Image (cartoon, helix red, strand yellow):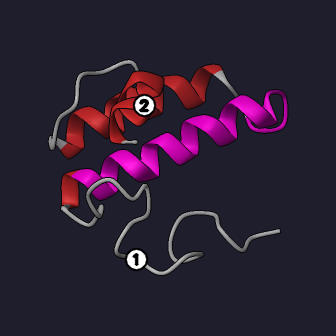
Amino acid sequence: MVRGAFDTLGIKVTKDKKAIKKAYSALVKQYHPEEHPEEWSRIHDAFQEAMEYAQGTVMRGSGFSGKQLGVGGLHGVG
């Protein structure tokens, strides 16, 4: 759910993209993906969900966004 994403980022639920990016940036500096892959993945997923909420693309109550799976971010990179 959306609240969990914002809890992970350590901020209140907001549509302020700058606040979301700032919180994400601070956390990824602390949890490098090679050193903390599970934590980084959780933070990255929370960032994507929070940004989708800010853009209005999250479907209510579903946990899924209006975007197709695998579009954007690092999905599919491997």
What distance separates the C-alpha of mark 1 from that of mark 2?
A: 19 Å
Which label number is shown at residue 57?
none
Crowd tier of the residue under label 2, counting other residues whose Cα lies within 10 Å: few below 14, some 14–19, many 20 or above? few
For label 1, the SS is: loop
Between 7 and 21, the one nearer to me in the picture: 7
Crowd tier of the residue under label 1, counting other residues whose Cα lies within 10 Å: few below 14, some 14–19, many 20 or above? few
Question: Which corner quadrant of the image does residue 17 belong to?
Answer: top left
- The residue under the point 79% across, 36% down is 37
Residue 38 shown left or right of residue 56 in the figure = right
Residue 61 shown left or right of residue 7 in the figure = left
Within the magenta stretch, is there residue 21?
A: no
Within the magenta stretch, is there residue 45?
A: yes
For label 2, the SS is: helix
In this rendering, is residue 60 above or below 43?
below
The image position of residue 50, as x and y in percent, is 34, 45
Q: Quadrant of the C terminus?
A: bottom right
- The residue under the point 84% across, 37% down is 34
Question: Which corner quadrant of the image does residue 20 belong to?
Answer: top left
- The residue under the point 18% across, 62% down is 56
In this rendering, is residue 63 above or below 44?
below
**Callout 2, which amino acid?**
Gly
The image position of residue 36, as x and y in percent, is 79, 28
Q: Quadrant of the N terminus?
A: top left
Instruction: Residue under label 2, please give it.
Output: 4
Number of numbered tags placed on the structure image: 2
Residue 78 shown left or right of residue 31 in the figure = right
**Callout 1, which amino acid?**
Lys
Instruction: Residue under label 1, please give it.
Output: 67
Residue range in magenta is 33-53
Question: Which corner quadrant of the image does residue 3 belong to?
Answer: top left
Between 72 and 64, the one nearer to me in the picture: 64
Please tell me which of labels 1 and 2 falls first in the chain: 2
